[in-house]
Amino acid sequence: MARRRLLPYLGLLAVAAATACGGGTSAGADGAAGPRSEARQPSPSVPDTASPVPSETTLEATPSPTSTEPPAFSAKIQKVDRSMLKHSWRPGCPVPVEKLRMIVMPHWGFDGKVHTGRLIVHESVAEEVAGVFKRLYGWRFPIRRMEPVDRYGGSDYRSIDADNTSAFNCRRATGSGNWSKHAYGLAIDLNPRENPWVNPDGSNEHPNARAFVKRPLDKPGVINPGDRVVKAFERVGWEWGGYWSGAKDYQHFSKGGG
Ligand SMILES: [Zn+2]
């Protein structure tokens, strides 16, 4: 069972401000260079419909007296157990299940409605990540969907193809034998269709992302250099893959880089 608690947001803001520009952990830094050859391959497996992860639900935006205020943001940070991570965690992973948390929080969709998202991250960053997504929510930054990668059988490729925003996945860094920051729950891929991995030659692995490989790009859900989304993550020490040299990973934010 998950233990739930509400976030102390006033305290969170103070903490976020105090830790702005703070360096992140270097654990698992896996570098940015090199082609992605691993963990980006199509998987023949089908979605695990028996996954214990709850289905995404839609919350109607509650009309407020002023009519322009979005429904209040609230996030729950819950413990996870092994049964929820059948595909994304296994013995030998660099983070024990007990150190992971699921953030359950609302986000705006491309449909102009509020949806419930679920994001699994390391416990050490759960509150600051919720703080960043609170800011995105306040801006009505659209997010296609936010489900644990277990809903895609642990397949990074399929999660990306579904334009799914996710974080934890116990896998190696692409083009490297080191663990990805995702394997620690210290990296997030945000709107991966709108923000694709782009090879140095401009190519990418996902046909549905071809309209999104250029930057700057003025489209909904797109992350651009120096924009408020990048700055919101930078405030809490998360770096953007769009600043990498060589290949760019426009969807990728990680604690301390890498
Ligand atoms: Zn990533």
Image: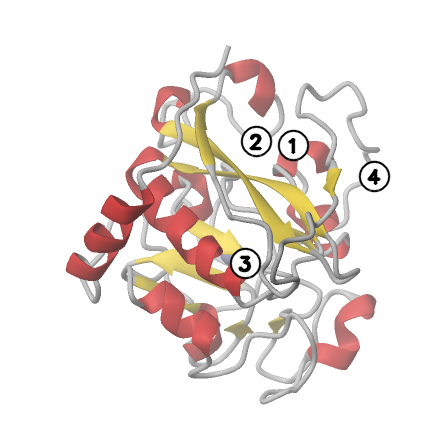
* N-terminal-most mark, 2 or 3: 2
Mark 1 and mark 2 in contact (Cβ < 8 Å)?
yes
Mark 4 and mark 2 in contact (Cβ < 8 Å)?
no
Could you say whether the residue bearing mark 1 is in a helix, strand or loop? helix
Can residue 191 be seen in this snapshot? yes
Which residue is pictured at 69% across the width and 52% down the height?
A: 63
Measured in 3D between alpha carbons, the distance from the residue under mark 3 to the one under mark 1, in whole angstroms, is 24 Å
Residue 192: % across, % down? 65, 62
* N-terminal-most mark, 2 or 4: 4
Q: Amino acid at mark 4?
A: Pro
* N-terminal-most mark, 3 or 1: 3
Q: Which residue is mark 1?
A: 150
* N-terminal-most mark, 1 or 4: 4
Q: Amino acid at mark 1?
A: Asp
Measured in 3D between alpha carbons, the distance from the residue under mark 4 to the one under mark 3, in whole angstroms, is 34 Å
Residue 163: % across, % down? 72, 56
Say which quadrant the C terminus sits in.
Answer: bottom left
The quadrant holding residue 211 is: bottom right
* Most foreground residue, 202 or 249: 249
Q: Which residue is mark 3?
A: 137
* Most foreground residue, 31 or 3: 3
Could you say whether the residue bearing mark 2 is in a helix, strand or loop? loop
Direction front: furthest residue: 65
* Most foreground residue, 204 or 220: 220
* N-terminal-most mark, 4 or 3: 4
Q: Amino acid at mark 3?
A: Tyr
Q: Which residue is mark 4?
A: 44
Could you say whether the residue bearing mark 4 is in a helix, strand or loop? loop
Could you say whether the residue bearing mark 3 is in a helix, strand or loop? helix
Which residue is pictured at 65% across the width and 32% down the height?
A: 150
Measured in 3D between alpha carbons, the distance from the residue under mark 2 to the one under mark 1, in whole angstroms, is 6 Å
**Residue depth check, mark 4 versus mark 3: number of the one nearer the observer:** 3
